[in-house]
Image (cartoon, rainbow, N blue to C red):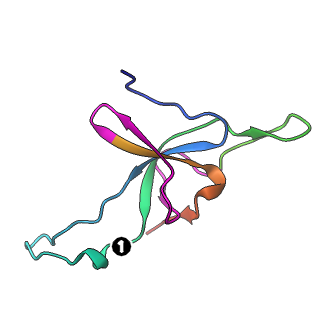
Amino acid sequence: MAKRLIPTLNRVLIEKIVAPSKTTAGILLPENSAKLNSGKVVAIGSGLRDKSGNNIPVAVKEGDIVLLPNYEGTQVKLGEKEYVLYRDEDILGTLHD
């Protein structure tokens, strides 16, 4: 069984961030209070090549927190962890404090 996945071309491997279901004080939160559909970039591909053969790198880097589209990408399970594989252009943006 594979332990690590390195995406090809312009694909990005994301670990989804699950919003907490209760506060630190133990108050249960309703499901619709979930924050943004976001995730952490775990691995990136090498990028695409243009017509001249120049590399077009992926726009995000490992460790970035990104905003994801509402649809799910390709589900991937490695060991006990679940990830989602997206194309670089499907990622909506990066989130910053």
Q: In the image, residue 52 lies at what x, y percent? A: 92, 37
Give the residues drawn in magenta, as a range: 59-81
Q: Which residue is mark 1?
A: 35
Q: Main secondary structure of the magenta part?
A: loop
Q: In the image, residue 83 lies at what x, y percent? A: 40, 44
Residue 57: say if magenta: no
Q: Nearer the viewer, residue 91 or 72?
A: 72
Q: Is residue 13 above or below residue 31?
A: above
Specify the quadrant that holds the N terminus.
top left
- For this orientation, the residue located farthest to the left is 26
Q: In the image, residue 84 lies at what x, y percent? A: 45, 47
Q: Is residue 31 above or below residue 10?
A: below
In the rendered picture of this protein, how many numbered marks are placed on residues?
1
Name the amino acid, label 1: Lys
Residue occupying the point 49% across, 53% down:
64
Specify the quadrant that holds the C terminus.
bottom left
Q: Would you say 92 lies left or right of 31 here?
A: right
Q: Nearer the viewer, residue 54 or 18?
A: 18
User: Few, some or many C-alpha atoms within 10 Å of disc 1 (few <14, some 14-19, many ≥20)?
Assistant: few
Residue occupying the point 55% across, 44% down:
12
Q: Is residue 76 above or below residue 68?
A: above
**Dividing the picture into quarters, in which one does residue 34 lie?**
bottom left
